[in-house]
Image: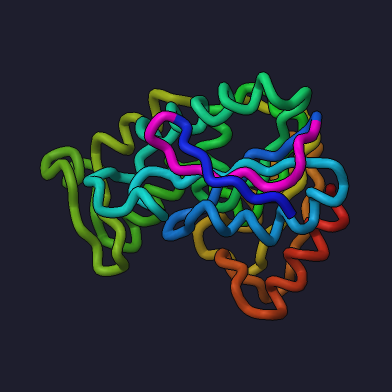
Amino acid sequence: MNTEQVLIGTIPAVLYGAPAEQGYLFLHGQMGHKEEAEAFAQVVCPKGYQVLSIDLPGHGARQDRGEELTPWAAVPDIQAALNWVTPRWHTVSLRATSIGAYFAMLAVEAPARALLVSPVLDMEALIQTMMGWAGVTERQLQEQGTIATTFGQTLSWNYLCWVREHPVHQWTCPVRILYGSEDNLTPRPMVEIYARQHSAGLTVMEGGEHWFHTPEQLAVLRNWEETET
């Protein structure tokens, strides 16, 4: 499989597959990196696609740059990647994981198709959930600006305000979701409601987690990708 390291401005990216008329933009989740797309590329490149994957701010080759993984930083990068592939592909689809799916919903107006793994579908609700875990009220967050938590996330008033002021795009393209029943970030009723409202295909792995990483979970992920592409 052809593999090419590219730079889109200052954004490290990797392009998988031979030149093609259709492709997928791959967006990893928190703590991820662009090379995670290789397994997906092995599935779709033989089917006539290319795959472009980028390192999101503060991740992969972009560590130690002083960048933070915020939507206002990630969205322009995703749009830059879209501008890079638009002259090369006739159709652009998405394969996005976790917070990468949320960023995609902000940045991409009309993908041809969207494959979402453990997607963060409502960032405001997730922030409020984390505030509950940390015992932080909205007034406290507003007064302090940022509050570090014991579970590794920093709550931010500016982040919450930004999320409220920037709604996601309402896609009309085919959407397929892979979800683990033990996902602690997106409640199952929320993903089921989203699937109904968007006529999205929903595959639930019973016992699966937000992060698909065990051999069994990865086998389910691979089979889902084979089936949905």
Determine whether 192 is above or below 183 in the image.
above
Q: Residue furthest bottom?
A: 215
Q: Which image quarter: residue 218?
A: bottom right
In the rendered structure, which segment of residues is drawn in magenta? 9-20
Q: What coloring was used for the rendering?
A: rainbow
Foreground of the two, 161 or 49: 49
Foreground of the two, 4 or 210: 4
Determine whether, in the image, residue 46 is placed left or right of residue 24.
right
Verify whether residue 13 appears in magenta: yes
Q: Position of residue 214 (x, y in %)?
A: 63, 78
Residue at 74% x, 68% y is: 205
Asked if one can make out residue 197 in the rendered structure from this viewpoint, the answer is no
Determine whether, in the image, residue 9 is placed left or right of residue 171.
left
Determine whether 78 is above or below 4 in the image.
above
Determine whether 150 is above or below 50 in the image.
below
Count of numbered tags: 0
Residue at 46% x, 47% y is: 55
Determine whether, in the image, residue 25 is placed left or right of residue 54.
right
Determine whether, in the image, residue 137 is placed left or right of residue 98.
left
